[in-house]
Amino acid sequence: MANPLSAADESTWIGDGTEGAVLNVDGSTITLGSAQQGTPYNIRLDAPTLSPCDSLYYEVELIESDGNLSVGLVSSSEFQPGWKTSGMFYNGNLTNGNAGLLIGFGDYLKSGDQVGVHLLRDGTQCKLVYHINGRCLGTGFVINSEKTFYPCLHLDGKASIKYSAPPSFPSATERQPVKYSDAYSGDWLLEKANLGPELHELSLPKDFHIILSFVSVDPTTYRLSIKVGNTFNTTVKLSGKMENFDEIQVGPAMATRMMPPPLLQPVEQFMQEGLPTLFKMIVSETGDMIMTGTTAEMLCRRYEKTFEPVTCTK
């Protein structure tokens, strides 16, 4: 199936009528700017050949940005000035153009990012799948509509982007995991914890995710954040090798000071007492991460947060 947008004139972008806003189109390059800070400017592709039955796909590369850009689709009737536009947008969160609908769906947009917007239509059912930098984020919106949708950019600030509409659709429609250049960066779900000199198993609360988040600072140092009831923040430094393990030094753990619910208090005590004792860790052949200390041990598996699609844009 061919992408109808690939045959549309890529230069026929129109603004929402906001006085003082900037819109310049030079081939596939678009420069736009809102009239004043805090009031967004919307532009959409004017493609009269599109129909309500069309699946669509387009990409934008964010060349330069000084503001907050949202990328998505809008119908002609919902394309209005400023905050009045109501569409299906991604800017790191999912938004309708005037309110956040789902927070943390993906990475916030920055210069150099490439965003793909894929509309899959089956009768009146519309599924909107987003991609960022070659990674499929999965379905963000599922709505029923008989309207025709058009590529739309929603911006508070200034930006320069490059627009393209490949002739074919991407094959990936399910959310793909984040890829990292090292073994530890990213999120891990605590599956098992052992405590004490004899390392007896600590009972973890059911139906509650305890997530360890590693962020690389440099090739040997990570920031580690652990969300229980409170959030524990520390550093983990790779200091050498111990057989197959990486030898580590864990810095002092700072924690927020909320009163956790009773079921989380034993886990919080475990983190407070056990983190400083950790001295080695490894990612096993099965992909699990093991962190071991004199009085604590943690077994974790890779974690990828999942999201239910937004089903209403109002």
Image (cartoon, rainbow, N blue to C red):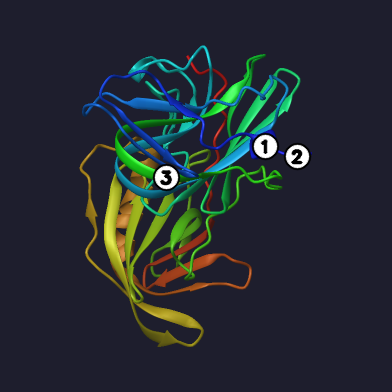
**Contact, mark 2 vs mark 1 (Cβ under 8 Å):** yes
State which tag comes first along the sequence, 3 or 2: 2
The crowding category of the residue bearing disc 1, from other C-alpha atoms within 10 Å (few below 14, some 14 to 19, many at least 20), is some
**Contact, mark 3 vs mark 1 (Cβ under 8 Å):** no
In this rendering, position of residue 244 left or right of residue 3? left
Near-viewer residue (258 or 170): 170
* Outermost residue, top side: 77
**Contact, mark 3 vs mark 2 (Cβ under 8 Å):** no
Q: Residue at x 71, y 47 (%)?
A: 171
Considering the numbered disc 1 on the image, is that residue within a helix, a strand or a loop? Answer: helix
What amino acid does circle 2 point to?
Answer: Ala
* Residue designated by label 1: 7
* Residue designated by label 3: 161
Q: Position of residue 33 (x, y in %)?
A: 30, 34
* Residue designated by label 2: 2
What amino acid does circle 1 point to?
Answer: Ala
Considering the numbered disc 3 on the image, is that residue within a helix, a strand or a loop? Answer: strand
State which tag comes first along the sequence, 2 or 1: 2
Quadrant the N terminus occupies: top right
What amino acid does circle 3 point to?
Answer: Ile
Can you say whether 38 is above or below 30 in the image? Answer: above
Which quarter of the picture shows residue 146? top right
